[in-house]
Amino acid sequence: MTQDLFGELLPEPTRENLMEGAVVLRRFALAAAGQLLNDIQQVTAQAPFRHMKTPSGHTMSVAMSCCGEQGWVTDSRGYRYQSEDPASGHPWPAMPESFRNLAGEAAAAGGFAGFETDACLINRYQPGAKMGLHQDKDEQDFSQPIVSVSLGLPVVFQFGGLKRNERPLRVPLAHGDVVVWGGPARLRYHGVLTLKAGGHPLTGACRYNLTFRRAR
Ligand code: SIN
Ligand code: FE2
């Protein structure tokens, strides 16, 4: 057993291979969850959650914010990374130490030692929100993995193939679970099914996802 901030006993993380290059680290972020959630509040006080529009004009059901040197944005001009928050014109908030440490440790546990993230996308799902199958491909170096942290309400994650039409695996994700994918799995399609209503002791009626990347 490990302990959280308050000395509470927590079940040990376990690892589940999805396919070559992709692993679910169950409960890996459980001990850090309280700090991560505090830091989400700090970041989003500076760069508030917003519903961005896709290039085709569709408003995303997931609310997003970013921190780190680069932030991922979408609008009528397309998908991209940029160093300023378009809502304020200011640089994105600095990446909290808790985020950076967790990302590096999870990447190493997933087989990608030396991962140094420069971009964290913060997704907030409220009941009814979902994310369709997509590839993370706006980054410069696909030898760098993706580290994706789930906090709060559970959801079903879809992890598919290198083509959109391949039937995805359905992977239930709970509070504290971390998915790491890279190498031959780096460009696999993925998404999440519609969030169901519920209540979580730490996040209430919502799920947060932190997606760490090396953008540049
Ligand atoms: C994403 O692919 O950006 C989000 C995945 C998730 O919410 O688990
Ligand atoms: Fe993604």
Image: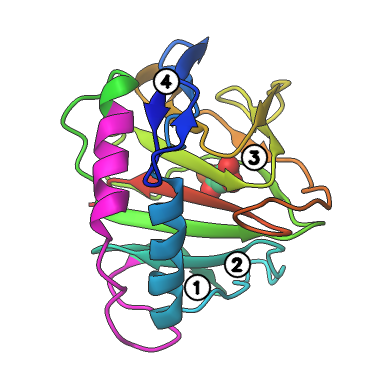
Label 1 or label 3, whichever comes before in sequence order = 1
Label 4 or label 1, whichever lies nearer to me, is: 4
Is residue 72 at least partly visible in the picture? no
Q: Position of residue 16 (x, y in %)?
A: 51, 13
Residue underneath mark 3 = 191
The location of residue 141, given as percent across then percent down, is 26, 39
Q: Quadrant of ligand 1?
A: top right
Amino acid type shown at disc 1: Arg
Label 3 within 8 A of ligand 1 by Cβ: yes
Under circle 4, the secondary element is loop
Sooner in the amino-acid sequence: mark 4 or mark 2:
4
Q: Does the numbered disc 1 mark a residue whose Cβ is under 8 Å from ligand 1?
A: no
Mark 2 Cβ and ligand 2 under 8 Å apart: no
Mark closer to the observer (1, 3): 3
Q: Report the amino acid beneath label 3.
A: Gly
Q: Are marks 1 and 3 in contact (CB under 8 Å)?
A: no
Which circle's residue, 1 or 2, is located before the other in the chain?
Answer: 2
Question: Magenta stretch?
Answer: 82-107
Which one is nearer the viewer's eye here, 66 or 56? 66
Work out how far the residue at label 1 is from the one at label 2, CA to CA, in angstroms. 6 Å
The label number, if any, that marks residue 55 in the structure image: 2
The residue to which callout 1 is attached is 77
Residue contact at pointers 1 and 2, CB within 8 angstroms: yes
Tag 1 or tag 4, which sits nearer the N-term? 4
Q: Which mark is residue 1?
A: 4
Identified by mark 2, the residue type is Pro
Please report the residue visible at 40 percent of the width from the left and 16 percent of the height from the top. Answer: 21
Above or below residue 63? Residue 166 is above
Say few, some or many: other residues with alpha carbon within 10 Å of mark 2 (under 14 / 14 to 19 / 20 or more): few
Q: Kindly identify the amino acid type of the residue bearing the numbered disc 4.
A: Met
> Mark 1: few, some, or many residues within 10 Å (few <14, many ≥20)?
few
